[in-house]
Image (tube, helix red, strand yellow):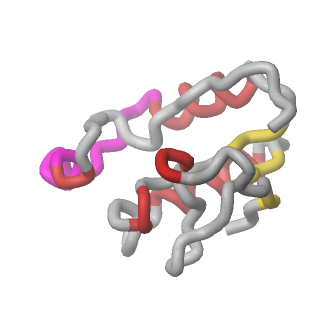
C-alpha cells in the first residue's frame, strides 16, 4: 500500500473483538477519545485510513463513524478507505484482499 507502518485508534472508549460485546458496552465515548484519535493521526503522514466492522453491522444507525471522519478531516487529515459497505461506511480490512484499492473517503 506504500506506507511504512500502521497506528490504530478506536472510536469508542470501550473496546471489544465482538460487535455484540461493544453493543453491550453501550458504545461508550470517553472524554479523551477524540484527542487520542487525533494524537494517533498526528503520528502519520497526513493520510488516515478509516474502517468500520465488517458489513457495517456495528456502525449502522450510529453517528460515531461520521463524527470521527468529520473530526479527522476538520483537523486537516485526508480520510481514506478500502471501499464502502452498502450503508456507505468504510470497510474494515479484516477480510479484504491485499490488492483492495484505496479510495478517498468523505462519508
Q: Quadrant of residue 4?
A: top right
Q: Nearer the viewer, residue 69 or 58?
A: 58
Q: Main secondary structure of the magenta part?
A: loop
Which residues make up the magenta segment? 21-32
Residue, x 34% and y 34% (percent of image)? 13
Q: Nearer the viewer, residue 92 or 61?
A: 92
Image location (x, y in percent) of residue 36: 54, 26
Q: Quadrant of the C terminus?
A: bottom right
Q: Horizontal and vertical percent for residue 35?
A: 57, 29
Residue at horizontal 49%, vertical 51%?
95
| Marker count (numbered) | 0
Q: Is residue 53 visible?
A: yes
Q: Quadrant of residue 16?
A: top left
Residue 24 belongs to magenta span: yes
Residue 59 falls inside the magenta stretch: no
Residue 46: x %, y % from top left: 84, 34
Q: Residue at x 30, y 35 (%)?
A: 15
User: Could one spot residue 68 in this view of the protein?
Assistant: no
Amino acid at each position: 500500500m506504500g506506507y511504512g507502518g500502521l497506528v490504530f485508534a478506536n472510536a469508542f472508549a470501550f473496546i471489544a473483538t465482538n460487535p455484540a460485546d461493544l453493543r453491550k458496552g453501550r458504545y461508550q465515548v470517553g472524554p479523551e477519545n477524540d484527542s487520542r484519535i487525533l494524537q494517533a493521526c498526528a503520528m502519520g503522514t497526513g493520510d488516515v485510513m478509516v474502517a468500520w466492522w465488517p458489513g457495517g453491522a456495528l456502525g449502522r444507525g450510529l453517528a460515531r463513524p461520521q463524527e470521527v471522519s468529520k473530526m479527522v478531516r476538520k483537523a486537516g487529515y485526508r480520510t481514506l478507505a478500502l471501499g464502502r459497505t452498502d450503508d456507505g461506511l468504510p470497510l474494515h480490512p479484516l477480510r479484504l484482499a491485499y490488492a483492495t484499492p484505496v479510495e478517498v473517503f468523505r462519508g
